Image: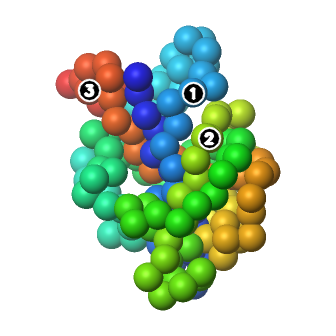
Amino acid sequence: MDLFSFACCDNDKEEFQTICKIGTGFTDVVLKELYLSLKSQVIPQPKSYYRYSENLKPDVWFEPTEVWEVKASDLTCSPVYSAATGVVAPDKRKKSEFCGFLRVREEKKPEDATPSEMVDKASSLFIVFYLFGTRLARNKADLIGK
């Protein structure tokens, strides 16, 4: 299964912070469309303002262009994800569990994604996150074109 990694935007720190991975909610048709649109967004390494744990490092990184709406049912503290760092407490971060893909939000820019300070206030709602990268079950060359 392919896992797409997502981030929220911390406007004060000017960085994208990891918040969840999604591998559900995709039909085969939607996955094919997503991969076709993402091929041109692949970058060789993460941007300097991407905050992530080495444990969550994607196989493929993307330009900050895609914003997807996801359904998040649980937001909990996490030692691994980087969302809302310091909002709850100096050493606490948040992650979103049980996320599912809803749709691509073409009208939104990554900076319009749910900000990290709002993540702490959310519990069960529709959240807009920026697409960060992906861990691939399929051949990496299929996406990056090599």
Q: Earlier in the sequence, mark 2 or mark 1?
A: 1
- Quadrant of the drawing holding the C terminus: top left
- Judge whether residue 32 can be spotted in this image: yes
Q: Which mark is residue 24?
A: 1
In the image as oriented, which residue stretches furthest toward the left? 146
* Image disc number at residue 54: none
Residue 99 disc label: 2
Seen in the picture, residue 23 relative to 11 is either above or below; the reply is above
Give, as a three-letter code, the residue at label 3.
Lys
Q: Which residue is mark 3?
A: 140
Who's the residue at 48% across and 87% down the image?
A: 90
Figure check: 134 above or below 123: above
The local crowd at label 3, few if under 14, some if 14 to 19, many if 20 or more residues have their Cα within 10 Å, is some
From the viewer's perspective, is residue 64 above or below residue 69? Answer: below
* Mark 3 vs mark 2, CA separation in Å: 24 Å
Which mark's residue is nearer the viewer, 3 or 2? Answer: 2
The residue shown at (72%, 52%) is 127
Instruction: Report the coloring of the rendering.
Output: rainbow
Q: Is residue 123 left or right of residue 7?
A: right
